[in-house]
Image (spheres, helix red, strand yellow):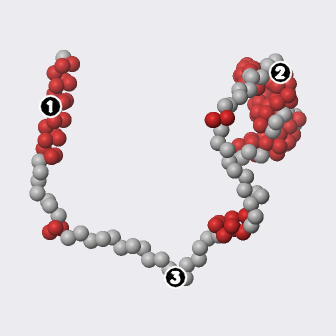
Amino acid sequence: MTSESLELARARYKTGKAAFENGKYREAVENLEKSSALLARNSRFAGEVEIWLATAYEAAGRTEDAIALCERLKRHPYPETSKEAKRLQYILQAPKLKRPEEWMTKIPDFTDVPDNDSKIRLSVAPKKSSGQRKKPEPELVDLTQVNTKDNRFITIALVAIALTVFSLVWFSI
């Protein structure tokens, strides 16, 4: 394998991984398959690429391909890859659980509502203002009207905290 094909494989891998993370699973599968084809099957990097490929297969709805790839990767020479393949295959073959209807939120379909498009455009369109908005000025407070008399709350709170700390120290001895 040449360094040029390795660099191309790394570039395809990064592109496929980014596509996967952005929810573009079909694009991720294409890039990861091309990256995998450029690599030696028994290398550590090829194992990492193919684990991502198996995950992308599952996300793209190709569960059988993902399981078959995991089955092959379980015999990979690097223990991390084979261990991850076993874990992934276990997850992929787990029975699918049914969710009760009361757990599901039903979203109404408004596509058949007449004149729906114009309402959506109106609600999304930003409002234009004729003049510039002024920032509200902070309200000034007359300090002669504020009660600044000490009500001893701080003193009582500090005494209570000191007594609590003293009693915790006293009883812990």
Q: Disc 1 to disc 2, how far (Cα)?
A: 66 Å
* Closer to the camera in the image, 83 or 56: 56
Few, some or many C-alpha atoms within 10 Å of disc 3 (few <14, some 14-19, many ≥20)? few
Query: Which quarter of the rendered picture does the C terminus lie within?
Result: top left
Q: Residue at x 79, y 33 (%)?
A: 58
Amino acid at dot 2? Glu
Q: Is residue 3 visible?
A: no
Mark 2–mark 3 distance (CA, rounded to whole Å): 67 Å
Of all residues, the one furthest to the bottom in this rendering is: 130
Q: Position of residue 69 (x, y in %)?
A: 84, 26
Q: Mark 1 — residue?
A: 163
Q: Residue 120 is drawn in which quadrant?
A: bottom right
**Which residue is tagged 2?**
71
The reply to whether the C-beta atoms of the residues labelled 1 and 3 are less than 8 Å apart is no
Q: Amino acid at mark 1?
A: Leu
* Residue 165 located left or right of residue 84: left
Q: Amino acid at mark 3?
A: Gly
Given this view, does label 1 or label 2 mark the residue nearer the observer? 1
The residue tagged 3 is: 131
